[in-house]
Amino acid sequence: MRELQSIVDYGRFNPAIDPVFGALPQWYWPSSPGLSNPGYAWVVSFWDGWATTFYDGRGPFFVRAVRNAP
């Protein structure tokens, strides 16, 4: 989750990410499960940078590969 949020550019909007990443202003899944409830999953909006949990992990969301550099 932290890696995905690290590429959000909170100074941008629609999309809230540097254009070099070529991301759409949509919801994206990280690999992190939702808090302490396995019925929820994290999602991050590249529309405005908002992060939240989404019930049951259902939805037409995108994925983005990110990693933490050594």
Image (tube, helix red, strand yellow):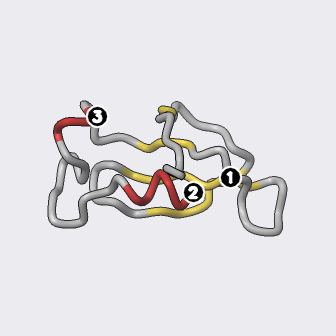
Residue 31: name its quadrant: top right
Query: Of callouts 2 and 1, which one flags the residue occurring earlier in the amino acid sequence?
Result: 2
Which residue matches tag 1?
A: 32
- The residue sitting at 61% across, 60% down in the picture is 53
The residue carrying pointer 1 sits among few (fewer than 14), some (14 to 19) or many (20 or more) residues within 10 Å by Cα, namely: few
Mark 2–mark 1 distance (CA, rounded to whole Å): 6 Å
Q: Considering the image in quadrants, where does the N terminus appear?
A: bottom right
Mark 2–mark 3 distance (CA, rounded to whole Å): 18 Å
- Compared across the picture, whether 45 is left or right of 2 comes to left
Looking at the rendered image, the disc whose residue lies closer to the viewer, 2 or 3, is: 2
Q: Check disc 3 and give the amino acid type.
A: Leu
Asked if the residue under mark 1 is in contact with the one under mark 2, i.e. CB atoms within 8 Å, the reply is yes
> Which structural element holds mark 1?
loop
- Compared across the picture, whether 6 is left or right of 67 comes to left
Query: Of callouts 2 and 3, which one flags the residue occurring earlier in the amino acid sequence?
Result: 2
- The residue sitting at 81% across, 53% down in the picture is 39
Q: Check disc 1 and give the amino acid type.
A: Ser
Looking at the rendered image, the disc whose residue lies closer to the viewer, 1 or 3, is: 1
> Which structural element holds mark 3?
loop
Which residue matches tag 3?
A: 24
Asked if residue 68 is positioned above or below residue 64 in the image, the reply reads below
Q: Check disc 2 and give the amino acid type.
A: Met
Asked if residue 59 is positioned above or below residue 41 in the image, the reply reads above
Mark 1–mark 3 distance (CA, rounded to whole Å): 21 Å
- The residue sitting at 54% across, 52% down in the picture is 70
Asked if the residue under mark 3 is in contact with the one under mark 2, i.e. CB atoms within 8 Å, the reply is no
Residue 16: x %, y % from top left: 24, 53
| Residue 1: assigned label | 2
